[in-house]
C-alpha cells in the first residue's frame, strides 16, 4: 500500500463520522501559530488544536520569511474583509523547536554543501539557519517590525518546543511590535 493509499484510508475514516462542516471561516482563537514543518512538531497535537481553533503557518524552521509577512498581511486583510471594521486583531506566536534541521546548516560547511546541491542562495540559507534560538527569535521579531506589510499593532511572542519532552516554553512574552 502506498503512502497516498494510507492517507486516503485515514481520510475515509475521518470523514465517516465528520460532523463539523458548519464551522465559520474565522477561527475561534486570535493567535496565529508560526512553526516548523517538522513531522514531530505538529501544533494540532502539542497545542491540542481543534478544527476551527486557529490559523497555523508552517515552513522550514518556523522562520519569518517574505511568505510569512505576506500571509500575515493577507490574513489580517481577509479578516477585515469578512468581519468588517470590528474585525478581530490577531497576535502571532512564533514556535521554534529543539533539534531543528535548520540547526544543521548553522556552520558554513554544511550550508555551502546544501547551497550547491539545491541551488538555493547561500545568503538565503544563512538567514534561515538557526545557531542559537534566542538570536533567531530576535531576528524574526525584528524582521516583522521592519516589514511594511505587518499591521503595526501586531502582538508577537516566541516559544521553544522541546521534541524530547513535548513541552513548550516561552522565550519572548507577548509584546506589541511598536513600529515607528
Ligand atoms: Zn524544524
Image: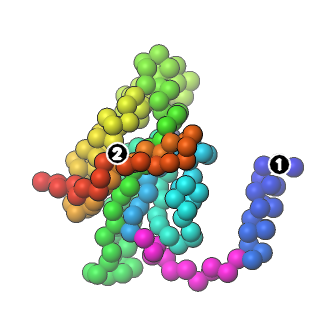
Q: Residue at x 41, y 32 (%)?
A: 130
Nearer to the camera, 111 or 164: 164
Is residue 93 something that shows in the picture? yes
Residue position marked by numbered label 2 in the rendering: 171
Would you say the beta carbon of the disc 1 residue lies within 8 angstroms of ligand 1? no
Residue position marked by numbered label 1 in the rendering: 2
| Left or right relative to 142: residue 167 | right
- Which quadrant of the figure has residue 132? top left
Q: Earlier in the sequence, mark 2 or mark 1?
A: 1
Q: Residue at x 49, y 76 (%)?
A: 25
- Binning the other alpha carbons within 10 Å of mark 2 as few (below 14), some (14 to 19) or many (20 upward) gives some
- Binning the other alpha carbons within 10 Å of mark 1 as few (below 14), some (14 to 19) or many (20 upward) gives few
Q: Secondary structure at mark 2?
A: strand
Residue 20 placed where, x, y %? 63, 79
Q: What's drawn in magenta, residue-wise?
A: 18-29
Judged by its main secondary structure, the magenta piece is loop
Amino acid at each position: 500500500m502506498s503512502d497516498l493509499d494510507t492517507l486516503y484510508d485515514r481520510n475515509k475514516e475521518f470523514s465517516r463520522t465528520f460532523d463539523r462542516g458548519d464551522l465559520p471561516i474565522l477561527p475561534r482563537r486570535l493567535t496565529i501559530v508560526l512553526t516548523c514543518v517538522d513531522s514531530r512538531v505538529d501544533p494540532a497535537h502539542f497545542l491540542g488544536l481543534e478544527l476551527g481553533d486557529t490559523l497555523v503557518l508552517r515552513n522550514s524552521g518556523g522562520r519569518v520569511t517574505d511568505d510569512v509577512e505576506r500571509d500575515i498581511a493577507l490574513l489580517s486583510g481577509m479578516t477585515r474583509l469578512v468581519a468588517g471594521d470590528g474585525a478581530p486583531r490577531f497576535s502571532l506566536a512564533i514556535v521554534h523547536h529543539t533539534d531543528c534541521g535548520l540547526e544543521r546548516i548553522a556552520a558554513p560547511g554544511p550550508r555551502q554543501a546544501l547551497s550547491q546541491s539545491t541551488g538555493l542562495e547561500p545568503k538565503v540559507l544563512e538567514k534561515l539557519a538557526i545557531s542559537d534560538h534566542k538570536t533567531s527569535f530576535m531576528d524574526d521579531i525584528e524582521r516583522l517590525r521592519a516589514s511594511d506589510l505587518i499591521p503595526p499593532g501586531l502582538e508577537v511572542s516566541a516559544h521553544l518546543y522541546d521534541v524530547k519532552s513535548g513541552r513548550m516554553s516561552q522565550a519572548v512574552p507577548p509584546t506589541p511590535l511598536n513600529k515607528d
